[in-house]
Image (cartoon, grey):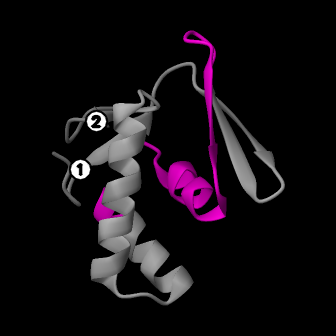
């Protein structure tokens, strides 16, 4: 289970391209792709292997003027889906 203290990173080899307000995320090794809406795209692009999910939620809370709790729930839900689909991996603290 993910927490706001977790740090995620895109899996090696994942490709993505902006298409209007959506982001197309491609896993070439598996021949799969996913489309994220504007908000999902912002979260995905902040998943960089350095920021915690809590830091990302805080940025989204400020951007969309929603409560930190709501932003945290939304970020955790999306991050869980991305992890489940193999688009991101969970990093250990201090891991480069």
Q: Quadrant of residue 24?
A: top right
CB contact under 8 Å: marks 2 and 1: yes
- Look at the picture and state if 8 lies above or below 3: above
Q: In the rendered image, which residue does mark 1 sit on?
A: 6
* Mark 2 / mark 1, whichever is N-terminal: 1
Left or right: residue 62 versus residue 52 is: right
Residue at the top extreme, as displayed:
29
Quadrant occupied by the N terminus: top left
Q: Residue furthest right?
A: 20
* Residue lying at 42% horizontally and 30% vertically, measured from the top left: 85
Q: Residues within 10 Å of mark 1 (few under 14, many from 20)?
A: many
Front residue of this view, candidates 2 and 48: 2
Name the quadrant of the C terminus: top left
- Per the image, is 35 magenta? yes
Q: Which residue is mark 2?
A: 90
Residue at left offset 55%, top offset 12%: 30
Which residue is painted at 55% across and 81% down in the image?
63
Q: What x and y, as percent, mark residue 33?
A: 63, 28
Count of all numbered marks drawn on residues in the image: 2
Which structural element holds mark 2?
strand
């Amino acid at each position: 289970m993910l927490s706001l203290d977790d740090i995620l990173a895109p899996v090696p080899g994942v490709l993505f391209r902006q298409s209007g307000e959506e982001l197309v995320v491609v896993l070439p090794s598996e021949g799969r792709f996913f489309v994220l809406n504007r908000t999902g795209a912002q979260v995905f692009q902040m998943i960089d292997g350095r920021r915690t999910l809590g830091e990302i939620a805080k940025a989204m809370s400020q951007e969309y003027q929603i409560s930190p709790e709501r932003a945290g729930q939304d970020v955790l839900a999306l991050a869980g889906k991305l992890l489940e689909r193999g688009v991101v991996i969970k990093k250990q603290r201090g891991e480069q």
